[in-house]
Image (cartoon, rainbow, N blue to C red):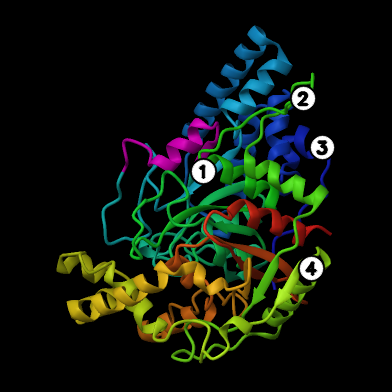
Amino acid sequence: MEHLPAAPAPSADHITDRSMTDFRAAAAWQWRQAVLDGEVSVVELASAALTAAATRSGLGAFVHLDPDYALGRAEQLDRTIVQLRRIQGTTTAAAELSARAPLLGLPMAFKDLVPVAGMPLTLGTRALPVQIPAVDAPLARRLHRAGAVSIGKTQVPELGLHCYSENQIAAAARNPLDLSRTAGGSSGGSAAAVSAGILPFAPGSDGGGSVRIPAAACGLVGLKPGRGRLPDDDQDPGVQNLPVSGPLASSAEDAALLFDVMAGHRFTSPTGSRVLGPATGPAQRRVPHALSQGLEPLRVGVTMESPFSPEVEIVLADDAVVAVQEGISRLQDAGHMIQGTDHCTGADRFWPADYFENFTSLWTSRLAGADFPAEVFAELEPLTQHYLELAASRSAADVQKSLAALEDFSAGAEDIFGPWDVILTPLLASAPPEIGWFSALSPEQNYVEQCRFTPYSSVVNVLGLPAISVPVHTDSRGLSWSVQLMGKHGSEELLLALAALMLRR
């Protein structure tokens, strides 16, 4: 089993010597602080990320690298930093910059589903012409204004539809924990880049698990915010609005920093001190507070039942069960109470009936309006063609019936919590399959196997709730296993803090 080298031990050398850079060697906020303090330049960090991405091209994390764009922007930021230091002094400039540009100098990459000005946009398909957007998508604009430096675009599945990041236009995104296996999807390229230390963290998007699935596959923290929580996401409250944006990071602390920026939070400097310090956002402050002070005891419900059951047989690997047991143990060690399903007494099942059929109808109905010419349809992957055929085969009445059932379910999203504050579930049912395994199946079987692999993620998108993937177990092969924590509306900061406590060792 081939895998990338483990993360180097954190050392000052990794910040001051670019030839040794592996972004896993320090936290993202430490890299940012090194820029603010003048220990490294933005150009040095951008160069390090570009070099790492090019050197590890076999990982398949990127479909496009843009050194000219990245280095040009990095040089511009370095000139601005130097000018502010001359005017205000190093300490004052650092405090101001940390508030105005909380991602200052940090290398970044967006999925190849997100428009970034001047960079090719393929949507992971050869069936459509490559676009060169003239302007950034709102999320890309927000992160760029926060000081991030985009180095390229990361690998995705065709049109972002699958849970593995393989397509017909570039090499598959491979898992740094085992290069023969998938990194997951649809944010697989981004997860691979972060897990391999090419980037300090990355934004992803999640329409059915596309942040949490690759996070779990690659041993990362992946936060899916609730529907409408991020200002740059679609604010439609309807159940058809599945995708949201969220951070992928090596730690809850780093995920909190990126989430604060994505959420448009204000960054402020510490108060009550004569010494100016770096500005932080509310989620970024919540995490260390929880680590030092703990959290009020939470009631955590645990369910192993998948909403896809019994229509799809779900079998959990032994290590998936071990991860749940480890997650429970860590929560109990942190003072939280694990509770059963007493509030479901009398019900045949925890999740609503017919979820698999209704979700399949919802998932494919989003393609119903796509009127692809015959020559374009022929260029699409077999699974994408299958989705389109399914969408066309369903009557409007059947689709509306499924959507109405899911709308009713979503309207009472928090009812599933009963006496609980948080719900814990497994995340992946099995280890990430080898590259090419899914695509070798018939389209019909491919879709079912994706559901078997990811049986707990899509329901959170339907409900519009926040959830986080927390890596808690490493098996004998070095593969990572995660649990999923689901929270109520507006609990993203709580989930980040809870993840940090679970990862403290």
| Mark 2, secondary structure of its residue | loop
In this figure, which residue is indicated by the disc labeled 2? 272
Query: Given the image, on which type of amino acid does mark 2 rest?
Result: Gly
| Quadrant of the image containing the C terminus | bottom right
| Quadrant of the image containing the N terminus | bottom right
For marks 3 and 4, give the one nearer the viewer.
Answer: 4
In this figure, which residue is indicated by the disc labeled 4? 330
In this figure, which residue is indicated by the disc labeled 3? 13
Proximity of marks 2 and 1: CB atoms separated by less than 8 Å: no
Q: CA distance from mark 3 to mark 4?
A: 33 Å
- In the figure, 142 relative to 467: above or below? above
Proximity of marks 4 and 2: CB atoms separated by less than 8 Å: no
Proximity of marks 3 and 4: CB atoms separated by less than 8 Å: no
In this figure, which residue is indicated by the disc labeled 1? 263
Q: CA distance from mark 3 to mark 1?
A: 33 Å
Residue placed farthest to the top in the image? 87
Instruction: Tell me where the magenta segment starts and ends, as one range.
Output: 132-151
Residue drawn at x 73%, y 37% is 30
For marks 3 and 1, give the one nearer the viewer.
Answer: 1
Which residue is more in the foreground, 66 or 244?
Answer: 244
Q: CA distance from mark 4 to mark 1?
A: 28 Å
| Mark 3, secondary structure of its residue | helix
For marks 2 and 1, give the one nearer the viewer.
Answer: 2
- Residue 291 placement (x, y as % from top left): 79, 51
Proximity of marks 4 and 1: CB atoms separated by less than 8 Å: no
Q: Is residue 126 left or right of residue 188?
A: left
Which residue is more in the foreground, 249 or 487?
Answer: 487
Disc on the earlier residue, 3 or 4? 3
